[in-house]
Every structure is written in C-alpha cells, then in structure tokens.
Image (cartoon, rainbow, N blue to C red):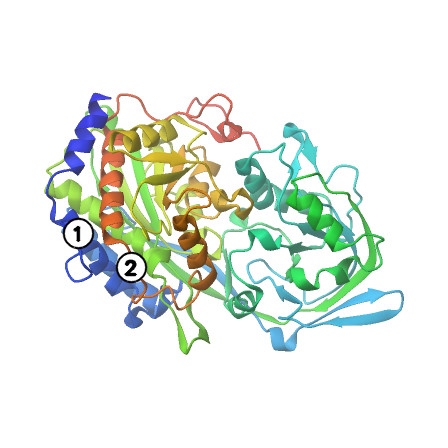
Amino acid sequence: MRRILIAVALAALPLTAFAAPPSKDSSAWWGHIKVLASDAYQGRLTGSPGYDKAARYVADQFRTAGLAPAGEGGSYFQPVSFLEQRVDAAHSSVALINGGAAIPLAVGPDLTLGARDAQPETITAPLVFIGYGLHLPEAGYDDFADQDLRGKIVVVLGGGPDTLSAALKSHASSTEFPKALEAAGAVGFIRVQNPKAMDIPWPRIIALSSQPGMRLTDPALQNYHRPMFSASFNPDKAQALFAASGHTFTELLALADAHRPLPRFPLNLSLQASVAAETRPVTSPNVVGLLEGTDPALKAQVVVVSAHLDHLGVGVPIQGDPIYHGAMDNAAGVASLIETAKGLQSAGARLRRSVIFVAVCGEEKGLLGSRAFTEHPTVPKASIVADINMDEFLPLFPLKHLLVLGEGESSLGDQARAVAAAKGYDTLPDPAPDRNIFVRSDQYSFIRTGVPSVALKVEGLPGSPEAKIDRDWNTFRYHSPQDNLDQPVDLGAADAFNGYLLALVTAVADADARPMWKADSFFRRFDTSNGAPPRS
C-alpha cells in the first residue's frame, strides 16, 4: 500500500502532460490524437504509408520521452510480416442447396466472406448447427462433443451459457474454436452474431467487409493449416439457414438471450461457394521503447504497457468521409502510452522493474502485431511479467468508474483495483460479456503466453446516461470515419485516466512481488513462470 500511495502522489504532480484546465488546444494528450487521426495519416492501415508515418511519429515521441530503442537492430521498430488477403465480393458467389434447388445468397446483404484466413476457391459442403461452437471440455461444456463434422461447414451463434464466465466464453470462441474446428475435420464455418451483442449495424459490417484481412506469415502463428471457408451471416436473414431443419432462428435466439445451452442438429442444407481473393505479402512494424529499471535484481523483469497504433485506413465513405481516422480507436491509447512515458520522465521516476512501451500493428486484423511480439519479443520472453493495455478507453464523460478487463484473473487486477480505490474510483464488471471484448484487444496475446494482463476503460454504471453515451458511440462512431477529431471528448476524464495509468504502471513496476495468476483462473494454464510447459 505504501508503494501505491507513492504512485498516487507521483501521478498528482503538476506534469505538463496532465495540466488543467484541459482544452483541445492545450492538452498534450489530445495533441497526439490530432496528429495521428488527421487526414495526413490516412487511417493508419497496417502495411500502408500512413501507418509507417504514424510509427515514425511514435518512435520520435519515445525518443523525446527518454525511452531507449527496444526494437530490432538498435531501432525502435520490430518488423512484422503478414499475408494480406482481399476478397472480391463482386466476383464471389454463395448459394444454399436444398435438395437439387440452389437458393442464391447476396454477398453483402445476406452474408460477408471472411478475409483473415485462407479461403478455398470453391466449396460445396453440408451445413450443421453446433450451438455456440464452444469447446471447453475441462469446464464441462463442449459443443463439438459427439459431432461428426468431417467435410462439413458448421454454423454457430454468438454467446454462451451462463454456467461459463465471460472470459471463458471469449477464449473458447477465439482460440479454442479454430483448433477444435480443424481437428474435427470441418471445412468451414458461418458465424451468426446475436443482435443484442452487435457493436455496429449490418450495413456498416458490409462496408467494413471490403477491408483487407491479414494473417501472420509464420505458419505456426496462423489459425488454420489449410484453407477454411468462413463467413458472417446477417442475423435478419439467418432464418434461411434453418428453413429445412425443423427449428427456427427465433427459438434459438430466445435460448441464447437467456444464456441457455443450445441444441445441435443438421440443417439439411448444403452451401456452395466460389470465393475470389488476392493475397500479397506486407510488412509493418511494432514500435518499442524501453525504460530500464534501477533495481539490480528486479530490472530483469519487464512490465509492458501496450496500445495498438493501427486502424482501418481508407474505405467505403460514410457521410462523405472515406478515412477511418481511429481517434478513440486507438490514437487515444497511443497518446496515453506516450504521455505516460513522458510523465515518468518529467517526474524523474526511477522504477525498480523495467518498463517497455509498445505500440503494435495489426490489432484490427486479429491482434497480429501483439501476437508476433509476445511469441518473439525483443526482450527475453521469460522476462515479461505483466501487460497493461489501452484500447478505445473512451473518456466521454467524467471518470468515476473503471472497467478492468481481467481484474479477477490475477494479482495484477488486484493492483489495478487498489490504485483505483486510492484515487477515488471503483471498478465495475464487464457490462456486456457477450461482446467478447476480453479477447478482442492486445492484452489477450499476452495472456495466451502466460503473462498476467489487464485492459482499462472508462465505464458508466449500467442503465446510466453514461452507459448510453458509450453505447451510442459504438453504434454511430465505432469503426467508422466519424471516430474523428470533431467528436466530443471529456478531456478532464482523459487526464484523470492518464493519472491513474501512471500510478498503476508505477505501482506494478515498484511492487515487491511480480503479478501472479490466481489459483482458480482458467488462464493460469498458460503460465510458464514456474518452469512448467503451458497446457493447451
């Protein structure tokens, strides 16, 4: 607690990064956003000139903050190699086959084709519904059990039963699903989102489907080892999938809304598809800076502070604007990364552990830059003891409550809660677990390699006006050009959040003990700090 109080006192110092009263003209934090989310950076698409320009800007800011280069070859950059795939929707076709009759589906209005993983050029296969598609036998739940999926395309509905935690459901739907699908011999999948858990309306999903997908060049870090058909189906049109099954989508949705187990059954239809796609190699860098620790023993341990630098680039115009600026998602997190480093420098902080600040690429393409960093870090892999991640933390109203994703999984969550309490904030549980945000940002890449991790957001109480502001932001600005420099932002909340982040980083870097997984955490299985190999 003494170190926490020291950290809070440090954060209260009159640093220029957190000067008051804030305005968009005086805020150093907003100044970084004004640069990174401007038209000149063209939405910072991974692999684009706009992203490379943003990476150089962040490297310059790291240098100014006194961080040592911690990339490759004595630079601030860690190059990451990708395969970029563009799906040509106009020259692709999909149909349902009922008996001998083909029922054409409209690519876009009815379904979108996945671009991240290698698609087969052509495919014809029967469809089978396997509920939520969760494979968690150790937790007593397995939608893959006793299913013959060889040569079939599975259909799954987003969500999961209330007997599983949000973190477990998220982990199963992202990491375990591809492994289980491939092991079962399936040839593809169609995912139907629960409308209540959708961040954005279907017309925006159609617009985003024109974006290129990416996968890491390293085959060991790809989801699949052979082409796998993938698509997302419009929930408003999903009854077409169940028309010959004896079930209705409405009945299944009611069970999902109640978080009940779902039945599994053949759909008595086949799917026939032709997918036109082009693939090319792309390279893009993570940006990495190091503040070396001062304790002779503890400086060998590294606390990572992370945020993704990439966004969606240039795409289908919305309200006349084709640039997906990514101001809150996630120039805001990168700005906090920079200002935390500068805050530590201004205070003359001498932290016991080393701290790495990393702005990663490829988050919008499936957490790829952070996956590359965690699997092949620029410091010894075993030295990384914690990750604190910022992604779209949304300072849209005064900071009173924080969402600490991963709070209950490790002692890092306890530290995050204690620092929040010392500064007068409380922490709230995830208000929308079916959105799977626990696995949708870069902290999850660290968790997969056994590193205790949290992600931080400004949160409103359920049912409050603040919660509605947050929902409206997702509906109207998330992954759209309207996440821009013209949107209203509570700069006081941003300053308060940055003060909290500075205090938390200091507390974790100066604590006597490194963060540890809790005994009952499912994710403890990935921990290798005791020398044991991770469990799959």
Residue in front for this viewpoint, 35 or 229: 35
Q: Which residue is mark 1?
A: 63
Task: Answer above or below: position of 237 versus 416.
Answer: below
Q: Which image quarter holds the N terminus?
A: top left
Residue in front for this viewpoint, 254 or 223: 254
Residue 410, horizontal then vertical, whole percent: 42, 28
The residue sitting at 62% across, 77% down in the picture is 90
Furthest toward the right, the residue is 99
Task: Answer above or below: position of 426 versus 100.
Answer: above
Q: How many marks?
A: 2
Query: Can residue 489 be seen?
Result: yes
Indicate the quadrant where residue 187 lies: bottom right
Label placed on residue 314 = none
Query: Can residue 67 be seen?
Result: no
Residue 377, horizontal then vertical, whole percent: 36, 42
| Badge 2 vs badge 1, beta-carbon distance below 8 Å | no
Judged left or right of residue 12, residue 487 is right
Which numbered disc, 2 or 1, marks the residue that appears first in the sequence? 2
Secondary structure state at the residue bearing disc 1: helix
The residue sitting at 78% across, 59% down in the picture is 125
Judged left or right of residue 205, residue 99 is right
- In the image, what residue type sits under mark 1? Arg
Residue 357, horizontal then vertical, whole percent: 27, 45
Judged left or right of residue 273, residue 8 is left
Residue 464, horizontal then vertical, whole percent: 42, 46
- In the image, what residue type sits under mark 2? Ala
Secondary structure state at the residue bearing disc 2: helix
Q: Which residue is mark 2?
A: 55
